[in-house]
Image (tube, rainbow, N blue to C red):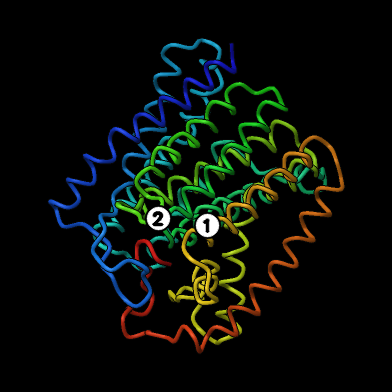
């Protein structure tokens, strides 16, 4: 029965997002809230960017219905939601504010950090599976907050290409759903699949050429939800394999973030200054079409997510293989990014110092 209710949760989330997104798109166009074309965007007209509202409605709405009608998750899911409802609300409010007012990077980072600390203090922890570290509460809280900020920021940063963030998160959420089945947690399966359903419902309108973007409302929400799921799995089975497994499941967005830090330091640019050298930018510069770029990154995410599931199951070879793939990918993309600097050009005058545009990071 747990599998059936998880499927229902997935379908509810999918349908809520698919039904609400056109209405949200019309409202955004009417209010003139959209992502305007510039030198770093691949689109040539203004695209509304409040699609994340529908994803929040779909995910949380389906979880609410699940709690109301399925007693099998009435204990664990409400406990998780009660712990994270306020900080997740802070993240959604932050994203919505940034989508309408375009906040500076340090303002966003401050709110993300506060929300992440609230989650960590509430009892949701990232455990590495080593008693020497996990037994120290202060270390665990700091690590958890750092991790949650990193995951939410990574999904936010990778949301710069039609269908990319939603597709990557869909694959990760499905992998977490399978992980929940492996670890026999009906609640975590349901939460994972509501996120997956929301992403799939949104992809109907966001797959190239996108008609609406999720904005920071969507990317920050999806990122914090994935981070919470990752932490929950390490608490459910606290060992080193689970830690590496959840990291592999989220590795493509994290890879893009580490590459952003590395290249900006190498090129002597401010770490928080927006640029046009993310993985999807570079693949486009080297001749790959938008859909080919998605195929490459979706495939990479799927392989690493599958290795992550196997790692959680207790195998060692997926960890070694996954880390090897990431090392090769980091080296390859880093060289491509540095080499593409002259091809892409730099347009710092278009973006105020310290600002981070809502969609193209």
- Left or right: residue 123 compared with residue 160: right
Label 2 Cα crowd, 10 Å radius (few <14 / some 14-19 / many 20+) = some
Horizontal and vertical percent position of residue 289: 48, 66
Q: Which residue is mark 1?
A: 294
- Left or right: residue 151 compared with residue 140: left
| Front in this rendered view, residue 191 or 91 | 191
| Residue 324 drawn above or below residue 163 | below
Q: Which residue, as the protein is rendered here, is positioned at the far right?
A: 316
In 3D space, how far apart are the residues under numbered discs 1 and 2 (Cα atoms)?
9 Å
Sequence-wise first label, 1 or 2: 2
- Left or right: residue 70 compared with residue 90: right
In this rendering, the count of numbered labels is 2
Q: Which residue is mark 2?
A: 208
Q: Which residue, as the protein is rendered here, is positioned at the far bottom?
A: 342
> Of the numbered discs in the image, which one, if any, rests on residue 82?
none
Label 1 Cα crowd, 10 Å radius (few <14 / some 14-19 / many 20+) = many
Helix, strand or loop status at disc 2: loop
Quadrant placement of the C terminus: bottom left
| Residue 359 drawn above or below residue 15 | below
**Residue located at (32% from left, 66% from top):** 43
Residue contact between numbered discs 1 and 2, judged by CB atoms under 8 Å: yes
**Residue located at (25% from left, 41% from top):** 22
Quadrant placement of the N terminus: top right
- Left or right: residue 307 compared with residue 20: right
Horizontal and vertical percent position of residue 356: 38, 69
Helix, strand or loop status at disc 1: helix
Horizontal and vertical percent position of residue 167: 50, 48
Horizontal and vertical percent position of residue 44: 28, 68
**Residue located at (44% from left, 53% from top):** 163
């Amino acid at each position: 029965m747990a599998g059936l209710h998880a499927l229902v949760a997935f379908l509810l989330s999918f349908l809520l997002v698919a039904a609400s997104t056109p209405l949200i798109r019309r409202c955004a166009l009417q209010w003139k809230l959209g992502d305007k074309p510039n030198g770093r965007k691949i689109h040539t007209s203004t695209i509304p960017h409040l699609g994340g509202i529908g994803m929040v409605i779909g995910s949380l709405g389906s979880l609410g219905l699940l709690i109301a009608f399925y007693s099998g998750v009435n204990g664990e899911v409400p406990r998780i939601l009660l712990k994270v409802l306020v900080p997740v609300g802070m993240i959604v409010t932050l994203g919505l504010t940034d989508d309408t007012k375009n906040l500076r990077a340090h303002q966003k980072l401050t709110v993300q950090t506060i929300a992440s600390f609230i989650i960590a203090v509430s009892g949701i922890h990232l455990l590495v599976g080593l008693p020497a570290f996990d037994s120290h509460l202060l270390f665990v809280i700091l690590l958890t907050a750092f991790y949650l900020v990193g995951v939410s920021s990574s999904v936010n940063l990778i949301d710069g290409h039609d269908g990319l963030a939603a597709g990557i998160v869909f694959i990760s959420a499905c992998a977490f759903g399978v992980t929940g089945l492996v670890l026999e947690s009906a609640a975590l399966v349901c939460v994972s699949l509501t996120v997956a359903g929301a992403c799939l419902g949104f992809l109907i309108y966001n797959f190239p050429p996108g008609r609406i973007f999720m904005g920071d409302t969507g990317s920050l929400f999806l990122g914090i939800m994935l981070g919470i799921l990752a932490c929950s799995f390490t608490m459910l089975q606290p060992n080193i394999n689970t830690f590496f497994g959840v990291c592999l499941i989220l590795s493509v967005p994290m890879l893009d973030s580490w590459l952003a830090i590395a290249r900006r330091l190498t090129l002597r640019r401010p770490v928080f200054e927006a640029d046009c050298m993310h993985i999807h930018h570079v693949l486009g510069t080297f001749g790959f079409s938008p859909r080919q770029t998605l195929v490459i990154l979706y495939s990479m995410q799927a392989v690493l997510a599958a290795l992550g599931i196997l790692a959680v199951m207790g195998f060692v070879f997926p960890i070694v293989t996954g880390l090897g793939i990431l090392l090769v990918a980091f080296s390859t993309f880093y060289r491509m990014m540095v080499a593409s600097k002259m091809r892409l050009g730099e347009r710092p005058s278009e973006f105020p110092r310290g600002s981070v545009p809502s969609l193209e990071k």
